[in-house]
Amino acid sequence: MDKRPGGGRGDAAGSVDGLWRGPRPERMTRRDMFAHCAALFGGFAFAGRDASVLFGGDERSGGSADPVSPASSLMADGSRVSGPCLEGARVRWIVGWTPGGGFDTYSRLAAPFIEKALGVQIAIDNVPGAAGLVGAMTLSRARPDGKTLGILNGSGYLWNRNPDARSSPDLAREFTVLARVSRRQQVIVAGPKAGLRSVGDLVARAKERAIIVGVTAPDSANFASLAAVTDLLGVRTEFVSGYPGSRELMLGLLRGDFEISSLDIESYVDVPGLESTTALLQITPERSPDPRLADAPNLAGPTGLVSARPDLFPGDAARVRSVTAAITAYLEFGRLFAGPPGMAPALRDCVEHGIHSALTDPGFAAAARRAGRSIDAMTGEEVRRSVPEAVRAVRAIEQVTAAAARRIR
């Protein structure tokens, strides 16, 4: 029997066979097969990676992915097919920190709204280690089929603590950024046993000996903030690292493992038991209205410490302004929702639209307020456009963080 499509079936077979061009089925790739099916049935028109996703996604995976649904695809005339692009799929959501911290909280708050927007089921998977780096690399190495997403420390991946060797993931190349959920707003806090009540006390103590500083890891945003700010103040430091997340860092602060650390403002004001600690400096361009931070000045901005008390910052004034701008730039990126690199543009746009719909849902805003979390959503496209400029700005702190990393115990 003729093994060609329709072979041995008379006239009908001949009419179909007449449409077949190029390689025969036994020699065809998935992409060839799709192109011929499109020609036969006038359906979807895909090119490049879009076609590979429909027939199995990323080349790295050997092509065994499930097909994405039509909403992740483009019609032949360029219009998008309506409907959820991953409807019915189970999505693994990677959180690179332990449960209960800020990244975990934002993920669990957003999950039901993303499920509603995309028609999926989300399973939160906490993969802690190295201040989120283990989770980030797990996400980066996943197949780009939309079924593995997660949350990233966007601030931490804008800078490289070792300028001579690429030691941090590349935010632009190793992930598909889909949204920003919030900025990072941090505060430098002294523990109850430190005996520090102000930035002036901190500077005076550092003239006697190095200040012991607690951080999660050398690639964390709290490390970068503390390294940069203490360098600006001329404060000598030694760093204690290895705390898996913000909750463990707070416990270390209360125990007296170290004298100061940097915490997200929302975590600081939301967690009971930190009343015995002292907020020294808000690492923000604007002061928080929370009364528990009333005595803590902010770093940047017209009324910030850099402008109001230049005597506290030894060294060149231009450098002080440059490093302060770098700190502000990387904290702007905050917490990002992302997928693996190489997501097909149509799939990426569909998932990004669904996530943005979730983040701008009034119900999500209400849930975040109840949890004491702020929302400052930005689309993935806006974030991706901003990355190159932010990376250039943040270079001002790379030498500082590289030097500080050598003082980690």
Image (cartoon, grey):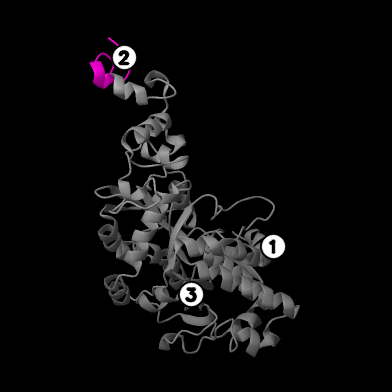
**324 lies left or right of 35:** right
| Circle 3 residues within 10 Å: few <14, some 14–19, many ≥20 | many
Vertical side of 297 occupied by 378: above or below:
above
Could you say which is closer to the camera, residue 134 or residue 70? Answer: 70
**Image x and y of residue 355, in percent:** 35, 61
Residue with the mark numbered 3:
185
- Distance from disc 3 to disc 2, alpha carbons, whole Å, reads 66 Å
**Image x and y of residue 32, in percent:** 42, 29
SS class of the residue under badge 2? loop
| Circle 1 residues within 10 Å: few <14, some 14–19, many ≥20 | some
Q: Which mark is residue 35?
A: none
Residue with the mark numbered 2:
3
Q: Does residue 184 show up?
A: yes
Q: Which residues are magenta?
A: 1-13
Going by the numbered disc 3, the residue's amino acid type is Gln
**Image x and y of residue 262, in percent:** 51, 72
- Dot 1 or dot 2: first in sequence order is 2
Going by the numbered disc 2, the residue's amino acid type is Lys
Q: Quadrant of the C terminus?
A: bottom right
Q: Which residue is most to the top?
A: 1
Residue with the mark numbered 1:
399
Q: Quadrant of the N terminus?
A: top left
- Dot 3 or dot 2: first in sequence order is 2
